[in-house]
Image: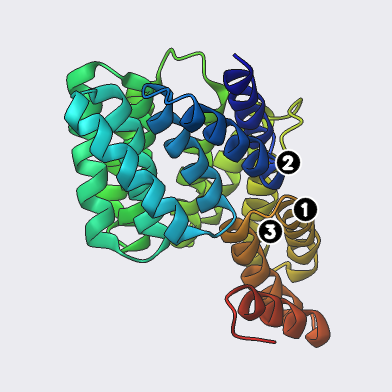
Amino acid sequence: LYAEALRVKGLALYSLGRVRQSVEVLEHSFDLFVRMNHTISIPVLLMDTGMAYSAIGKYEQAGTAYEKALQIWRQDGNLSYQANLLNNLGVLRYVQGEYEKAAIAFEEGLVCAQRSGYTRMEAYITIGLGDLYAELEDFSIARSNYQHAAEVAQGMDNRFILFYLKMAQANLALLQKNAVEAHKVIKNAAAMIEASDSIYEKGLLNLGLGRLSLLEGNPSKAAEKLEEAEHGFSEDDRKLEGDSSRIWLAAASHQTKNYSTARQMIKNILGSRGQVA
């Protein structure tokens, strides 16, 4: 089917970090499936488009798409799809600062993943729980979740999960101001994506390297890496990661007395949230 081919193309664009292009392709695929009344594929495309909407900051549209898909899969009793969807919903609520709702979605998704034997999603969800507890500064619970994710992912032929886990562990070390541990973990993560063409992966790595340089007292080097991260995320409209890069770049620029760049980054963040004309 042409509609399914479009879905595959949209997901490929998304995985390469070309999010804006993926949104258009996935929306087209969704429209075609709706016209055909292809009931099996409709909730799948709702989840896919919701994921892309979330990446570009269209959180309300993402939430609506996720809730519609979840309702369908709960009625069907499809645990694997529910696990995937609830992971995405947990990430969305976490990004929105709705931590209790995020925890509920992650925990429900974890049960679905374990009951269905969906180990890949179990790993993603436990990483998400780790990120949530790291944000809440409950570092011991965060570390336990990352350790569980590592155990689940052991032996998996999935480089991205292992890389994403390493960057999550690096974030934990940075939050704890443990430069030695952060340096070791980021070095391992960098080796994993040495041959990668993914803008997203390189952006995450540069964001981590920039934050590490700030922690080590080298704001000039930090600014260089954070500029690379911000450029990559901006190119593909990754709102959340782009804003994170801008916040840290503003901090690095302020420390190097590059006040014009610091002001511009803050303006860009506020502008993306509709607070600056």
Measured along the vertical axis of the image, is residue 37 above or below residue 126? above
Left or right: 233 as drawn, with respect to 27: right
Q: Tell me which residue sits at (52%, 37%) in the image.
A: 164
The amino acid on which the numbered mark 1 sits, given as a three-letter code, is Glu
Q: What's the CA distance linking mark 3 and mark 2?
A: 16 Å
Q: Position of residue 217 (x, y in %)?
A: 67, 69
* Secondary structure at numbered mark 2: helix
The image shows residue 231 at horizontal and vertical percentages of: 78, 57
Q: Residues within 10 Å of mark 2 (few under 14, many from 20)?
A: some
**Residue density around tag 1, few if under 14, some if 14–19, many if 20 or more, within 10 Å:** some
Residue 26: percent from the left, percent from the top?
59, 36
Q: Quadrant of the N terminus?
A: top right
**Callouts 1 and 2 close, C-beta under 8 Å:** yes
Mark linked to residue 261: none
At 70% from the left edge and 70% from the top edge, which residue is drawn? 249
Which of pointers 3 and 2 indicates the residue nearer the eye? 2
Question: Please, what secondary structure does the residue beneath circle 1 have?
Answer: helix
User: The residue tagged with tag 3: helix, strand or loop?
Assistant: helix
> Circles 1 and 3: CB distance less than 8 Å?
no
Give the residue at mark 3. 210
Q: Which mark is drawn over residue 235?
A: 1
Of callouts 1 and 3, the N-terminal one: 3
Residue nearest the observer in this picture, 273 or 200: 273
Q: Residue at x 43, y 61 (%)?
A: 60
**Of the residues under marks 1 and 2, which one precedes in the sequence?**
2
